[in-house]
Amino acid sequence: MRKPRSTARSRAPRTTRDLILDAAEGRFAEGGFEGVSVREIAADAGLKNQASLYHHFRDKRALYEAVLTRGVGTLLAMVAEQTAAGEAATVPDQAAFDYVEKLLDYLAAHPKLPLLIQRAAIDDSKQLRDTATRLLRPLYGQGVNLLAASGGRWEQADLPHVGAGLYLLIFGYFANATLIEAVAQIDTRSPAVLARQRRFIKSAVSLLLGPPSVRAPRRRRTP
């Protein structure tokens, strides 16, 4: 069975700050900003008291923003790497497929991140939504650029919709894992189920991007 590739985060030694961010990522994803206490995060991180957490983060909001920044920053770096690879590749769309592969590895190792992003966009205050938007906009832009460089079947005006569809296809599985488990009666985190989901997503992405010679269906003209 295919083992997830190691990531920079998993290879690096775990510092106290890392442990706090890991604990906060899980807590904020499950409970949102208002539904989580600093004491709970400190306990999950193995700290003796919450005062120790404030040596690393000014306050709860600073911790929340740091969690989002770490997760989104890693995704940004991955897109930038694959965009550069796509510019140098003889098969342009291979960079997009490689990115999907690495992204699935990363999300399988950090499945709470998609739920955290979803919750930040929906559940929390406008101030926190604005923070999430500011962090995610560059990721969106880079993702659309990667799609544009893939040499696929879609016109430029279609790319925002393709990007949104791919985001929901890939991130939505992890963000809605609890609902999927209840409805489909499967363990979304089991190696076998994750392997099937990986195969499905790769096939779907291949169909969505398509070879350069394949044209998207013509739009109907409106009267």
Image: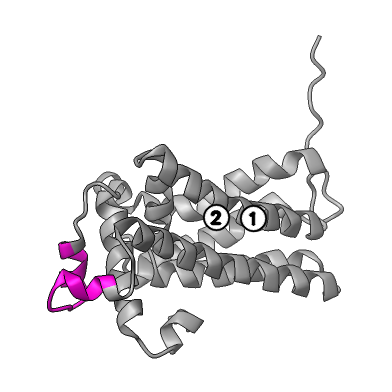
Judged left or right of residue 47, residue 101 is right
The answer to the question of whether label 2 and label 1 lie on touching residues, with beta carbons closer than 8 A, is yes
Q: Where residue 5 sits in the image (x, y, percent)?
A: 49, 82
**Residue at position x 67%, y 56% from top?**
143
Q: Is residue 152 above or below residue 103?
A: above
**Residue at position x 42%, y 38% from top?**
126
Q: Quadrant of the N terminus?
A: bottom left
User: What stretch of residues is rendered in magenta?
Assistant: 39-54
Q: Amino acid at mark 1?
A: Pro
Q: Where residue 196 sits in the image (x, y, percent)?
A: 44, 64
- Can residue 141 be seen at all in this image of the molecule? yes
Q: CA distance from mark 2 to mark 1?
A: 7 Å
Kind of element beneath mark 1: helix
Q: Is residue 223 above or below residue 179?
A: above
Q: Where residue 42 sits in the image (x, y, percent)?
A: 19, 70
The reply to whether the magenta stretch includes residue 75 is no
Q: Quadrant of the C terminus?
A: top right
Residue that carries the numbered disc 2 in the rendered image? 135
Q: Viewer-proximal residue, 163 or 30? A: 30
Q: Which quarter of the picture shows residue 97?
A: bottom right
The reply to whether the magenta stretch includes residue 50 is yes
Q: Viewer-proximal residue, 77 or 133? A: 133
Instruction: Please tell me the numbered disc located at residue 138.
Output: 1
Q: Where residue 113 sits in the image (x, y, percent)?
A: 41, 60
Judged left or right of residue 171, residue 26 is left
- Label 2 crowd bin: few (<14), some (14–19), many (20+), radius 10 Å: some
- Can residue 186 be seen at all in this image of the molecule? no
Q: Viewer-proximal residue, 195 or 31? A: 31
Kind of element beneath mark 2: helix
Judged left or right of residue 41, residue 91 is right
From the image, give the main secondary structure of the stretch colored magenta: helix
